[in-house]
Amino acid sequence: MNYEQMNNNKLQLIGEVVKEPVYTHEVFGEGFYETALSVPRLSQQRDIIPITVSDRLLMRHSVKVGDKLNVVGQFRSYNKVDGAKSRLLLTAFVRDILEEDENANSNSIEITGFICKPPVYRTTPFKREICDVLIAVNRAYNKSDYIPCIMWGRNARFVQNMQVGDKLTVTGRVQSRTYVKNLSPDEAEERVAYEVSVSKIITDDARHNYNIEIASSVIEQ
């Protein structure tokens, strides 16, 4: 993986392990396990973020329920095929486990990529402006991660006018939220979605350069 691919997707999470690691797959002889971190918000709520950890890291660090971890890596996506259907799943791919740092941001992400679907702008019944954007982030071996992002307020108004293929850098935090998926008129299922709640947008185009910080109390609602 080259320097650009290492730096276009940077994530740090600090939280508590809430489930035992479960083996999922192997790549070139290296085994990988999935667990989850409970990461606090300023609002006292918590995001439950799935993380993927290699067996090599597990040999050097304790990763069991109740442990507090400070992890760095990338936010990645993959398709899970279930019968005739395919679902986009997201996970924090852990590159390293660091020592505890009380001054570090417990939930921060910065990604650089390209808009790959037309932005979806809407307003809530309480007149809050929201825009959903799917960003494709290049990875090694000609792969890409598809990261759902949500913008608020002035960021939402700005990004709604961007086009598929436009390049941008966003920073924010990873959040989890539950929603109800209607499978049929008589059947519904509760699911969990993961997305980047964006606090800052930077574009390469000087005509569209936009760099806005949104107070944490706003983006965490």
Image: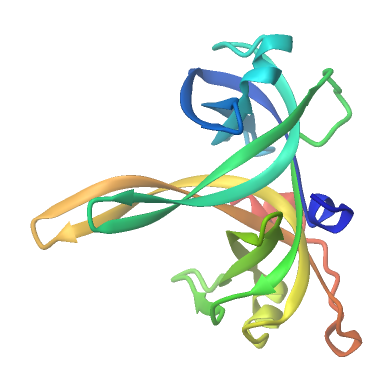
The quadrant holding residue 169 is bottom right
Q: Is residue 31 left or right of residue 153?
A: left
In the image, 135 versus 37, the foreground residue is: 135
Q: Where in the figure is residue 156, as x and y percent of width and height?
A: 65, 75
In the image, 178 versus 44, the foreground residue is: 178
In the image, 166 versus 219, the foreground residue is: 166
Q: Where in the figure is residue 122, as x and y percent of width and height?
A: 50, 77
Which residue sits at x=65%, y=47%?
A: 75
Which residue sits at x=59%, y=63%?
A: 150
Which residue sits at x=13%, y=53%?
A: 187
Q: Where in the figure is residue 146, as x and y percent of width and height?
A: 57, 61
Which residue sits at x=69%, y=48%?
A: 173
Q: Is residue 187 left or right of residue 125?
A: left
Tell me if residue 84 comes above or below residue 68 in the rendering: below
Q: Where in the figure is residue 160, as x and y percent of width and height?
A: 62, 83
Tally the marks: 0
In the image, 26 versus 204, the foreground residue is: 26
Can residue 78 be seen?
Answer: yes
